[in-house]
């Protein structure tokens, strides 16, 4: 008979809790005291391990020109897609020195997991590489009524998230509760449709 150990899962879009078996690959949330998540993700990816560290662009004025630099959204944040056992083994590897699993604040024995949907949408926004899309704080987000939307056109086509007003612009926000919220650039109303 198979053991049914469970871990906490953050659904991303609804914030509800669910449980998954340790033997199923999931998106585990890790943090580091060293702030080297992007370098760790790159090293792990070269070894064929699915890892993701969100980034964004920051502007710097050099002379009269504005130059955009890629920087980590949260230098200590890393997502790994693996089984629980694989993640525990990877944490012992040199690439992940200083990293640790993030645990559910409501159950200190259950590692936090990001849902596949939330990660797919987060990765789509980040990899669109648009300078004005970035991680946002809850104070910056003013959610609009209407719930979830699907972006139907433009560089964020296929992203599902919540419509929000951020700095006077309508954007779509993907949230992994307790971990990160990431906003697209301005999206016109005609490029969105409601999702049930």
Image: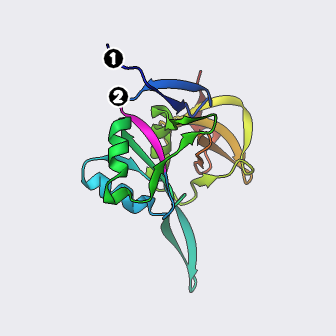
Image spot of residue 136 (x, y percent): 64, 52
User: In the rendered structure, are the residues bearing label 1 and label 2 in contact, judged by CB atoms less than 8 Å apart?
Assistant: yes
Main SS class of the magenta portion in the image: strand
Q: Is residue 108 left or right of residue 43?
A: right
Q: In this view, does 131 lie to the left or right of 45?
A: right
Q: Which mark is residue 67?
A: none
For disc 1, the neighbor class at 10 Å (few under 14, some 14 to 19, many from 20) is few
114 within the magenta span = no
Mark 1, secondary structure of its residue: loop
Image spot of residue 52 (x, y percent): 41, 50
Comparing 167 with 152, the one in front is 167
Q: Can residue 155 be seen in this view?
A: no
* Disc 1 versus disc 2: nearer the observer: 1
Comparing 99 with 11, the one in front is 99
Q: Is residue 96 shown above or below 67?
A: above
Magenta segment = 25-30
Residue at mark 1 to residue at mark 2: CA–CA distance: 10 Å
Q: Name the residue under label 2.
A: 23
Work out which residue is located at the far top of the displayed protein and give it: 1
Q: Is residue 131 shown above or below 2?
A: below
Mark 2, secondary structure of its residue: loop
If the image is split into quadrants, where does the C terminus sit?
top right
Q: Which mark is residue 2?
A: 1
């Amino acid at each position: 008979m198979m053991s049914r150990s469970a871990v906490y899962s953050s659904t991303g879009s609804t914030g509800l809790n669910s449980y998954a078996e340790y033997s199923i690959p999931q998106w585990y949330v890790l943090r580091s005291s060293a702030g080297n998540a992007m370098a760790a993700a790159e090293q792990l990816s070269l070894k064929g391990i699915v890892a993701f560290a969100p980034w964004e662009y920051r502007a710097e004025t050099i002379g009269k020109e504005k130059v955009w630099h890629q920087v980590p959204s949260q230098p200590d944040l890393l997502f790994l897609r693996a089984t629980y056992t694989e993640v525990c083994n990877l944490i012992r590897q040199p690439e992940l020195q200083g990293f640790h699993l993030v645990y559910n604040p409501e159950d200190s024995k259950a590692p936090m997991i990001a849902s596949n949907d939330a990660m797919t949408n987060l990765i789509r926004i980040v990899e669109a590489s648009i300078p004005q899309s970035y991680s946002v704080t809850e104070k910056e987000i003013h959610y609009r009524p209407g719930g979830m939307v699907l972006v139907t056109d433009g560089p964020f086509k296929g992203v599902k998230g919540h419509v929000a007003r951020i700095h006077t612009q309508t954007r779509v926000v993907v949230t992994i509760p307790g971990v990160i919220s990431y906003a697209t650039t301005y999206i016109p109303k005609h490029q969105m449709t409601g999702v049930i």
